[in-house]
Image (cartoon, grey):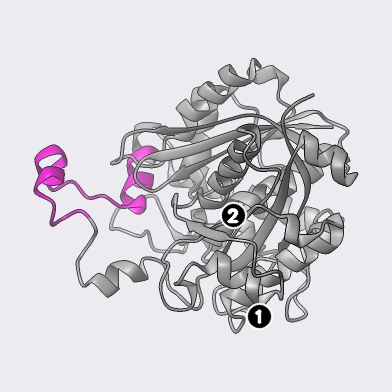
Amino acid sequence: MAGAYIIDAVRTAVGRRGGRLAGEHPADLGAAVLTALVERTGIDPAEVDDVIFGCLDQLGTQSANVARTCWLAAGLPETVPGVTIDRQCGSSQQAVHFAAQGVLSGTQDLVIAGGVQSMSTVPMQASWQTAEVPDPFSGSTGWRARFGDEEITQFHGAELIAEKWGLERRRLEEFALESHRRAAAAVDSGRFAAQIVAVGGVTADEGPRRDTSLEKMATLQPLRPGGRITAAVASQLSDGASAMLIASEDAVRRYGLKPRARIRALTVVGDDPVLMLTGPIPATRKVLDRAGLGLADVDLFEVNEAFAPVVLAWQAETGGSPERTNVNGGAIALGHPLGATGVRIMTDLLSELERRDARFGLQTMCEGGGLANATVIERL
């Protein structure tokens, strides 16, 4: 069966901002997962056609094409190229898409997709501050003619979504608490252990808060007066890296590889840039149509928990089952190292499909600018 095959996938633990991974250079985080991926798959690294990494705020230690830097920091062959991309929060999921498209086109056979982000080293939106402008939009006459002075931030979008779908603060906090509960249960049962490459002795995700409660969440101040969004219902700022090997059918045969899954369908969509975070809704419909599947055919869903209202609005509009969505917790509990999260999520989705002996998984992520990627993978 022709296609783009997932051979294996690995990740670091996700560290809290200022936590135990804070002192690790992004190149070394990326090098750790690349080294482990090469070792686990047994490939000759010189045969890799490209390394595609997601990373946001590409400056400082994350500048100068960090994908290439990670590969070289791992001591891997200089002959292999690398490229760094920014599709906002979906960057490493987009890296998987580009890798799969290269394989499906017949122009490449082995491509590594992944991402890295050190939010301790390079704060979120640091590139805006470097440019000394309030945001990337305000200086554009064309943008202002189209959108006026409307606030364009993910926080504003999350508030608008909560208001539009009638999601009260208590409901958002209940969702966040469940994310922490599911993540803690996954950690305790060892579900993430095989995925994680130790870096600096860190072998477990630092984000899950076992002692949190609805009472504690209720004491937090909203991000804006009278708002519903607090830090408790938002993804955590984090450090981490992830990597996945995508191979063609020919490469699978030639190198004796054993695929874990194949990419069944992929898509990316644009949506309202003011609401910003609603893209997973149309992306889900589009990717299911491309896959020739219905919602009931999908065994597990991963919808990135940028904010609690993103997932709750997605469930309301698509009918996606809460019991089959983010079953091991999401970014509210596990953290969101922006450029690495897409492959981090897909790594967990793949592992959970295997654990449950299930077949189809659907992953989608909201992204800055009103974008969303969606992927359907089929376990083999």
Q: Quadrant of residue 53?
A: bottom right
The residue positioned farthest toward the bottom in the image shown: 23
Task: Describe the element under mark 1 as helix, strand or loop.
Answer: loop
Residue occupying the point 90% across, 44% down: 256
Type of the residue with mark 1: Arg
Type of the residue with mark 2: Thr
Residue under label 2: 341
For marks 2 and 1, give the CA distance. Answer: 18 Å
Task: Describe the element under mark 2 as helix, strand or loop.
Answer: helix
> Where in the figure is residue 179, as x and y percent of width and height?
64, 50
Q: Quadrant of residue 204?
A: bottom right
Residue occupying the point 79% across, 53% down: 186
Whichever of labels 2 and 1 marks the residue nearer the N terminus, that label is 1
Does residue 67 appear left or right of residue 296 in this picture?
A: left
Secondary structure of the magenta portion, mostly? helix
Vertical arrangement, residue 72 with respect to residue 360, above or below: below
Residue span colored magenta = 137-161
